[in-house]
Amino acid sequence: QVQLVESGGGSVQAGGSLRLSCVASGYTSSSNTFSSNCMGWFRQAPGKERERVAALDVSGLAGYADSVQGRFTISKDNAKNTLYLQMDSLKSEDTAMYYCAARQSPWCRGFGSESYAYWGQGTQVTVSS
């Protein structure tokens, strides 16, 4: 079973930076691997719906929510089975639990959170103003 484990969350002041990591393990099929999956970062704040923050497909095409465009960068290291989210110029409204997720498909664009098969447990990000 594929497992995703996030790390890197914490508390930071507004304007600061954090780098989240997500290590994937348990891929056993040659037809379904970390490198062949669309990977995404989602977040959910208390009382709010889950929001897709960023996603990265196998061609390297990244997509971002308008609220984080220009501040967050998603990347991955296939050799390490690790997904990253670099978060700069953090704002108080970025406070949320952050989750990484994987689709059993190379492509991300146009697909909602319900299409992601694997999810991590989340890492908390708290930004104080």
Image (tube, rainbow, N blue to C red):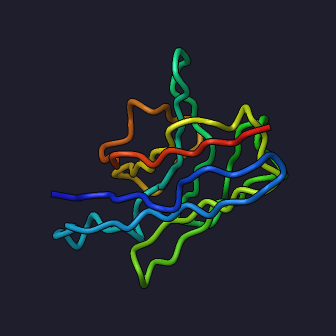
Figure label count? 0
Closest to the observer: 94 or 103?
Answer: 94
The N terminus sits in image quarter: bottom left
Q: Nearer the viewer, residue 28 or 98?
A: 98
Q: Is 120 situated left or right of 111 in this image?
A: left
**Residue drawn at (25%, 67%), measured in percent from left and top?**
31
Q: Is residue 38 above or below residue 28?
A: above
Residue 5 at x, y = what percent? 34, 59
Q: Residue at (34%, 49%) from the top-left corner?
A: 120
Is 101 situated left or right of 93 in this image?
A: left
Hey, which residue is sitting farthest top in the picture? 47
Q: Quadrant of the C terminus?
A: top right
Q: Is residue 52 left or right of residue 99?
A: right
> Residue 64 placed where, x, y %?
70, 45
Residue 24 position within the rendered picture, expressed as x and y whole percent measured from the top left? 33, 66
* Residue 16 position (above or below residue 65): below
- Most distant residue in the bottom direction: 79
Q: Residue at x 26, y 68 (%)?
A: 25
Q: Work out whether residue 69 or residue 12 is closer to the camera in this orientation and state it.
A: 12
Residue 96 in picture, x, y percent from top left: 57, 35
Q: Residue at x 73, y 54 (%)?
A: 72
